[in-house]
Image: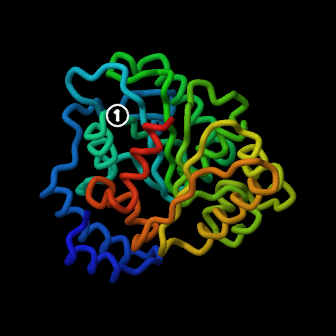
Amino acid sequence: MLVDESLAALRRLDWRITPESRAAHRALFTPLHETHGYRAPVVHRDLAYGDDARQRLDVHTAPGAAGRPVLVFLHGGGFTAGDKTLPGTPFYDNVGGWATGNDVVAVTMTYRLAPEHPWPSGAQDVAAAVAWIREHIAGHGGDPDRIVLMGHSAGGTHVAGYLAGQAGTAATGVIAAVLLSAFFDPAPVQHQAPMRAYFGEDPDRYPMQSAVAGLVGSDVPLLVAVAERDLPDCHGQAVALLDAMLAHRASMPLFVTIPDHTHLSEIQSLGLDDEAFGAALARFIRRA
């Protein structure tokens, strides 16, 4: 867990996403990760799962690993930016380091960006990556029949779209999914320019593009999570999804509110503040 001084600094961070807030988050967590150590013992970089330059992934594993569950992580970035590694920072190699420390093989992946690649390109890229992983991950110590997807923010939206069938394929080999501060229905958040860049400007299409009905009908176990000091729209999207599931299903997905954290810090702190989210994530993967 974070020591008192770091936890106090976390609580002072601005929850809003601004250049200043991003810089403050990086300034807090980068040296903590560097002191603690954050990389997996073995990382295979920039493996192609498609023809586009953005369709690349990294595999994080350990020597001698065999038959381990596989955690596939999709970064955020407002649909128009972001990457599987951010130069000069531990992000998101920290996801790979956390995974290998919990006897899990991790895959961190990039995907094509809006507006050049609008909806449903994200779900299609998830499908392409899953197909690559099922074919190749055994050679890196992973079990192709035990894939857990995890997406943060826009990445979570792409995971949700894939589970909802928006890629045109079934979620084969995926045993569970983690939706971390994701967006499921574009209609309530159409005021955000990044949403319109990905989903388009036509509100008449938004009901068809929503992943809510597909998630309600999916039998893939879910962990839905938001940060305590998350973006208000993320709180609203999570509540709406849980409300829809409560109305149509006999059981609810697991839901976690990550204490003290912001939209950025909830994933940047993985491997440092596992009491807040990492422990629940590890337990969810073991259950799956």
Above-or-below relation of 201 to 254? below
Q: Is residue 78 visible?
A: no
Disc 1 target residue? 104
Query: Where does the image place residue 165, in percent across and percent down from the top left?
Result: 72, 36
Residue found at x 15% / y 55% = 36
Above-or-below relation of 269 to 18? above
Viewer-nearest residue: 279 or 62:
279
Residue found at x 49% / y 45% = 150
> Mark 1 is on which residue type?
Val
Query: Where does the image place residue 270, in percent across and percent down from the top left?
Result: 33, 55
Residue found at x 50% / y 22% = 145
Q: Quadrant of the N terminus?
A: bottom left
Above-or-below relation of 89 to 222? below
- Compared across the picture, whether 10 is left or right of 4 comes to right
Q: List the single residue furthest toward the bottom.
A: 12
Viewer-nearest residue: 207 or 234:
234
- Compared across the picture, whether 45 is left or right of 121 comes to left
Residue 137, quarter of picture: top left
Query: Where does the image place residue 19, in percent across and percent down from the top left?
Result: 39, 74
Query: Where does the image place residue 202, in percent across and percent down from the top left?
Result: 81, 59
- Compared across the picture, whether 34 is left or right of 102 comes to left
Residue found at x 69% / y 35% = 167
Residue 98, quarter of picture: top left
Q: Secondary structure at mark 1?
A: loop
Viewer-nearest residue: 69 or 89:
69
